[in-house]
Amino acid sequence: MLIPFSMKNCFQLLYILQVPKAGLKNTAKGGLILQSTSNNIYQNLAVEDWIHDHMNLEGKPILFLWRNSPTVVIGRHQNPWQECNINLMKEKGIKLARRRSGGGTVYHDMGNINLTFFTTKTKYNRMENLKLVIRALNAVLPQLDVQATDRLDLLLEGQFKISGTASKIGRTTAYHHCTLLCSTDWISLSSVLKSPYQGIKSNATPSVPSLVKNLLENDDTLTCEVLMESIAAEYAAYHQIDSNIILINPTDETVFPGINRKAEELQTWEWIYGKTPKFSVSTSLNLLSEQSYSEMKIRIDVKNGRIEDCSIDAPDHWLPQEMLDKLSTRFIGNKFCQSEATVLINALLRTCPKDHELYSKWHLLCEKVKTIM
């Protein structure tokens, strides 16, 4: 059963448990099952942060159920340029988020369920959580062949990945979260999780490609709501707690003091792109103007999402070296992103010599450089 978590519900819980009126902070006596009313990735990730940072989970495990509008979520130590098609995502209005846990890149939409299991550090057990999910799936579909792997993924029929795992372990608390593919949009998933960028060298954690499948393909009557109810029931039985799902609003400061600041931080450029491990891009670009054809070599070093060093080499007959050096120098210190490069390049083009051939080559060079960002 779904119960809206209004302030009335909050105070009822606080009264019953006889704890101070401080939102959810100390109300998880025996454990809670929460479900977000938001489909915003940054707000839902902020809930994870808030619970991890503020709640005493000793003897009070929490299951958090949440879904998001179309989003690509990268791991804490990943490179978004390596993992996804950033420009295509912008065209499609698909968000990009960096979570605080490790692991690989995943695609979220309303056909995917996210499960977060919160416990103390000593009670942290990802395999037990996955076995619980398998039992919940079999309660709905008894003939479903689902197994947990050594990598802590869930495989359907021995080959199709339906769930991936990541986690964060703190000093005293921990959480394990996983996805569950029910009816995800395959076209969007396959198109945006394919990076078009070439020549990237990085020590960032790479994702491991897998065959995937929706549970809906095994039963076309299946819904995310049915699966969440079954998982909640199995979780409640396992932990011997109330099976009611409490609906929460992740923007409610009366329940989660300070949570909106956490959500704001998660959607900043500095967090999403600036936390990318240092990397370099080395590639060649073909330049074709009206009168000549040349190959240009470019190398860019990026640290904290900003260009630390840049070198552009092209034949002398194509463009004067001083113009190439000017472009390289102006890039240093700027964000490694197309929008900022566009502003910079437009300013530089206004300083270009009033020579039609030089201007055309300079413009073409600048446009080519933008394609690697």
Image: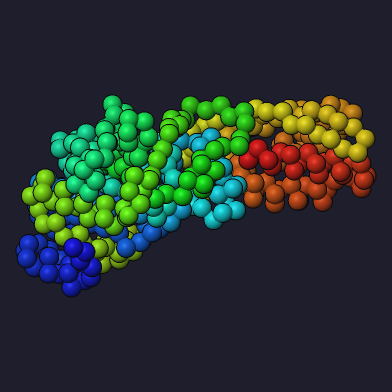
Residue 237 pos. (x, y %): 10, 49
| Quadrant containing the N terminus in the rendered view | bottom left
Image position, residue 67 (x, y; %): 35, 54
Q: How many marks?
A: 0
User: Which of 306/243 is in front?
Assistant: 243
| Residue 184 shown left or right of residue 233 in the figure | right
Asked if 337 appears above or below 288 in the picture, the reply is below
Residue 71, percent across and down? Answer: 46, 50
Q: Is residue 270 visible?
A: no
Which one is in front, 363 or 334? 363
| Front one among 167 and 224 | 224
Q: Is residue 119 left or right of residue 68?
A: left
Which residue occupies 16% across, 60% down? 244
Identify whether 160 is placed above or below 261: above
* Quadrant housing residue 5: bottom left
Q: Is residue 223 above or below residue 253?
A: above
Q: Is residue 75 left or right of residue 48?
A: right
Structure colour scheme: rainbow
Q: Quarter-wise, where is residue 209 in the image?
A: top left
Q: Is residue 248 at all visible to an observer of this figure? A: yes
Query: Which residue shows up at 63% across the image and 40% down it?
Result: 373
Residue at 15% in and 66% down: 21
